[in-house]
Image (cartoon, rainbow, N blue to C red):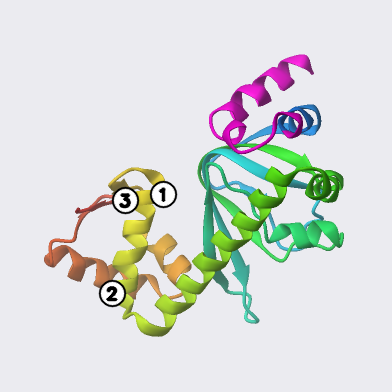
Amino acid sequence: MEKDKTLIRKKLKNYFSKIFEKNLLNEIIETGIYKTYSKGEMLVDIGDEMTHIPLITKGLVKITREDKHEEEILLYFLEKGDTCAISFVNCIHLSKSMFRGVIESDTECVMIPVNKIEDWLINYRSWREFIIDSYHNRLVEMVEAIRSLAFFKLDDRLHKYLKEHVKLLHNKKLNITHQEIADDMHTSRVVISRLLKILEKKGKIKLGRKNILVAN
């Protein structure tokens, strides 16, 4: 147990120690659970009981929701320093998750028990500011996703999607399939493959075997 506390303290040091008060950090270390997930694993699924929320210390998590036809809609991504603030409402009201979180790249996080959330909102200013900022960032990302759907042509949306992945993963070469992109963009693999070839002809990307190199 003491070893876990030492590990959590080390993982929090790189980012969260800069924004949380010392006493709050100590509470997180005492109550948090260190977890690791591999690409493709599920962090949380629709309908799950919300017992913990994650503080992401490494990796990338894709957050989606299903429409009335049970097709997935990409909402946003969580990366280092993030938490899924929208899930706080589920936690506070003890309701089930409305979202699905899938691991996009190997992820490490500290899981916080939900019974601590309200107490920390009252007791720690840094926690309140963190949650408000998280809500704001997620809202901006969802508004941007809606704007892209409403006003961007599909090829422009695809190029934007690829550039955002490069930024999130810090890697110009994306190991992603055409089907995965199609699922995220709510279209067919055939359409995505055609648009990728158009982007390649324009010099914006270079297609490889199971990877895509995105130009500057």
> How many numbered marks appear?
3
For badge 2, the amino acid type reads Asp
Q: Tell me where residue 168 appears, x and y as whole percent.
A: 41, 49
Q: Name the residue under label 3.
A: 210
For badge 1, the amino acid type reads Leu
Q: Residue 155 carries which label?
A: 2
Q: Mark 1 points at which residue?
A: 168
Residue 163 sits inside the magenta stretch: no
Q: Tell me where residue 128 appears, x and y as whole percent.
A: 71, 51
Q: In the picture provided, is 164 more to the left or to the right than 198?
A: right
**Nearer the observer, 198 or 28:** 28
Are there few (<14), some (14-19), or many (20+) residues within 10 Å of tag 1? some
Give the residue drawn at x 76%, y 41%. Answer: 112
**Nearer the observer, 151 or 74:** 151
Q: In the picture provided, is 2 more to the left or to the right than 106?
A: right
At mark 3, the secondary structure is loop
For badge 3, the amino acid type reads Lys
